[in-house]
Image (cartoon, rainbow, N blue to C red):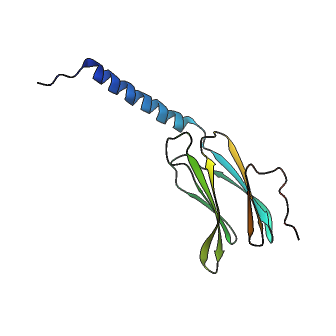
Amino acid sequence: MSIRPAGFCLVCALGWAAAAVQARGIEDMPPPHFSISIQGTGIAGKTLELDAPPYSKTVVESLGDLTVELTPRQDTDPNGRAVVRLLRNYEGARVLLHTAKVAGNNQGKWQLAYLICNDAVTFMSPAPQILPGCRP
C-alpha cells in the first residue's frame, strides 16, 4: 500500500500553475522588434523592421546579395539570446560575414546596424542615429 502525502498533489498543482503563468507571461509580451540598418560601399542605406517572437522560426530578409537571418531566442531563460547573422552571396555560395548574439529579454526594440566597407564589416549595437560612412 502506497501512501502519498496530501501536500504532494498541492505542490504539483502549484508547480503547474506557476509554469502556466510563466508561459502565459511570455505569450502576453509583445514580440521583440529589431530595426537592422545596413549601409556601405555600393549599398544604399536600408533599414529592416523585423519582429521575432520567442520560439518562432528564423526570419530571413534579403537585400541584393546580402541576407540577414534573425533567429529569436528558443528558451525560457530570461537571459536567452536572439542571433542575427549577416551573409553575402558570392558566386552562388553564402558566406557568413558576421554573427551577433543579442539579449532576448527586452520587451522593446533593438536598433542594430551594419556598415560594410569593401570587405570590412562593422556591427553597431545600439545603432547610432546617423550611421557613419565608409572612408575613402
Q: Residue at x 52, y 55 (%)?
A: 57
| Location of the N terminus (image quadrant) | top left
| Location of the C terminus (image quadrant) | bottom right
Q: Could you say which quadrant of the image residue 61 lies in?
A: bottom right
Residue with the most extreme bottom position = 91
User: Is 43 drawn above or below residue 131 in the view shown?
Assistant: below
Res. 98 in view: yes
Residue with the most extreme top position = 6
**Residue 48 image offset from top left, x and y in percent:** 70, 56
Q: Could you say which quadrant of the image residue 11 lies in?
A: top left
User: Is 46 drawn above or below residue 35 in the view shown?
Assistant: below
Res. 53 in view: no
Q: Residue at x 75, y 68 (%)?
A: 120
Left or right of residue 11: residue 97: right
**Residue 80 image offset from top left, x and y in percent:** 55, 45
Q: Could you say which quadrant of the image residue 121 lies in?
A: bottom right
As rendered, which of 97 and 93 lies closer to the eye? 97
User: Is 12 drawn above or below residue 95 in the view shown?
Assistant: above
Q: Residue at x 60, y 73 (%)?
A: 94
Residue with the most extreme left position = 1
Left or right of residue 16: residue 39: right
Left or right of residue 28: residue 8: left
Q: Residue at x 78, y 63 (%)?
A: 39
User: Is 44 drawn above or below residue 73 in the view shown?
Assistant: below
Give the total number of marks visible in the rendering.
0
**Residue 31 image offset from top left, x and y in percent:** 60, 43
**Residue 14 image offset from top left, x and y in percent:** 38, 24
